[in-house]
Image (cartoon, rainbow, N blue to C red):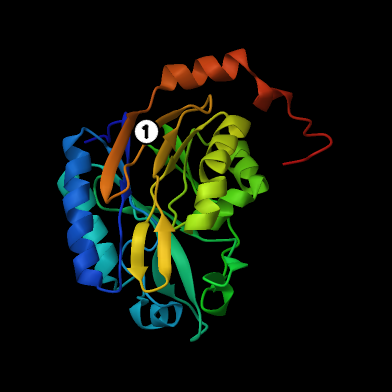
Amino acid sequence: MDDVMPTSVAAIQMCSGPDREANLSVAETLIAEAAGLGANLISLPENFSFLGRPEEKLAEAEDPERSHVLDFLRDQAQRRRAYVIGGSIPIRTEDPKRVSNSCFALDPHGEIVARYDKMHLFDVSIDEENTFRESDHVRPGNETVVFEAAGIKVGLSICFDIRFPELYRRLSFAGAHLVFVPSAFTVPTGRAHWDVLLRARAIENLCYVAAPAQIGEHIPGRKSYGKSMIVDPWGTVVAVAPDRPSVISAELDADLLTRIRNRLPALDRRRNDVFPP
């Protein structure tokens, strides 16, 4: 049976912690809620299966060929007959001291159709309470990823990537109609920049942006901003989550996307001779 073109996207907001089974239980409940809303393209936030101390990621990491979390995602995609974007999970690498922060996309048959490894790692010192060195435990990816979901081209990115517009322009060159940004933004950076960055990427590339996010305190001293968001190609915020674990959804309007791109043909006016793809 042919897959049906996705017509509704859902972004799931969670407050994940160090207990993987508890996180998967919450994710299952929220995926069911998203499917009940009619969403057939459902996305989870960054670190949805585990959000604890960075050094603990090494113990949580799995091989993709033998992954309990990927088995969970396969089951959910098949059961809900939906595309499922698995936020991000830690995957083992050849380096015993570093994992990849990987986003897997699964089709309604439970098949993996795309994998994206986070490119831009969160090495920052915002203040004394918000200092991170993701690169100490995570190996960056090097490949941009766009896959086709029954006629819709979908780009993948993760959290800190949102600050690098060249990545999204590359996804645009590859034809992306919709880009996912599963995230775990800190409270100070989220309050200052979250909605501005998401809207900017949608406006620049005339595409939908869906950003499922973490919210609340995960472990002592680690809090996330939340405000999961879906933005249309005009830059209008069409859905934003309340300050709790929840689901937001929005229709994917192919006609709206076409009208906006025709009326404001910025993508066709790119100076590729000066700024080559």
Characterize the local packing of mark 1: few (<14), some (14-19) or many (20 or more) Cα atoms within 10 angstroms.
some
Residue 174 falls in image quadrant: top right
On screen, residue 107 versus residue 161, left or right, reads left
Q: Position of residue 100 (x, y in %)?
A: 48, 70
Residue 205 appears in the figure: yes
Furthest residue to the right?
274
Q: Residue at x 62, y 50 (%)?
A: 163
Furthest residue to the front?
128
On screen, residue 186 versus residue 62, left or right, reads right
Work out whether 100 lies above or below 30: below
Task: Give whichever of 100, 11 is nearer the camera.
Answer: 11
Task: Give whichever of 222, 25 is nearer the camera.
Answer: 222
Could you tell me the amino acid type at mark 1?
Ala
Work out whether 174 lies above or below 163: above
Q: Position of residue 80 (x, y in %)?
A: 18, 44
What residue is pinned by disc 1? 239
Residue 107 appears in the figure: no
Q: Position of residue 219 (x, y in %)?
A: 35, 72
SS class of the residue under badge 1?
strand
Task: Give whichever of 80, 229 is nearer the camera.
Answer: 229
